Every structure is written in structure tokens, then in C-alpha cells.
Image: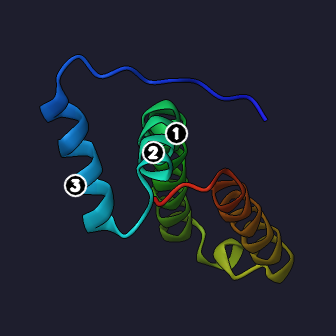
Amino acid sequence: MPAMNVPFDEDDDLRAVTEAAAAAGVSTRQFIRDAALDRALAKPRAFLAAALAEQDRIAAVWAEHDPEDARPDPARHAAEAEAAAALAAMDNARGTAA
């Protein structure tokens, strides 16, 4: 498994991270890993959230325009639920505490 040492210039910095990890109930190693992944994945997650919000907005406009065509589609809802579960599983596999 790949690893990396993370140097801290100040003892106070390391102490702050260690205390924050303890307060979160995780190891310092897990805390630093989660923070790094959260930062690395922030942009893709923000993009996905914006895309989903826009999808909802467009669906609402379409429903206003053509209510008959806006009826629920069980197959689409099942595919959306499956995609959401896959994204959650990827987050869990990475060990993020998001």
C-alpha cells in the first residue's frame, strides 16, 4: 500500500491535528487521510452537486411545460438510485468521513 510521511514544521500544528482527530474519534492517520481526500475530491463533488441541482431545475421546468411527460419513470429512478449507491460505495471504499 502506498504511503507518505507528512512533516509538520511546528509541534503545535501536529498537536492540533492529533487533538482534532481524537475529538473526531479517529486515528491521526485516518484524520489526515480523510482531510486530504476531502480536499482532493471537493471540486468533483461540487461539480456533481451542481449538475444534480441543474437536473432538478430542468425537470421542474419541463414538468411545468409538459406535465404528461414529467410522470415518474421507475427505470430512471432505479438507475439514479443505483448510481447514488455506487458513489456512496466509492466514498466508503476511500475511507472518507464526508
Q: Label 2 belongs to which residue?
A: 50
Foreground mark, 3 or 2? Answer: 3
- Residue 82 spot, x, y in % from top left: 80, 70
10 Å neighbourhood of mark 2: few (<14), some, or many (≥20)? few
Q: Label 3 belongs to which residue?
A: 19
Q: Nearer the viewer, residue 49 or 24?
A: 24
Q: Is residue 8 left or right of residue 10?
A: right
Q: Is residue 45 left or right of residue 14?
A: right
Q: Nearer the viewer, residue 75 or 2?
A: 2
Question: Which residue: 37% across, 70% down?
Answer: 25
Q: CA distance from mark 3 to mark 1?
A: 19 Å
Q: Quadrant of residue 38?
A: top left
> Residue 80 bears which disc, if any?
none
Give the amino acid at mark 3: Glu
Give the amino acid at mark 2: Ala
Kindly give the residue lying farthest to the right in the view shown.
75
Question: Which residue: 50% across, 51% down?
Answer: 30
Q: Label 1 belongs to which residue?
A: 37
Foreground mark, 3 or 1? Answer: 3
Q: Are marks 3 and 1 in contact (CB under 8 Å)?
A: no
Q: CA distance from mark 1 to mark 2?
A: 20 Å
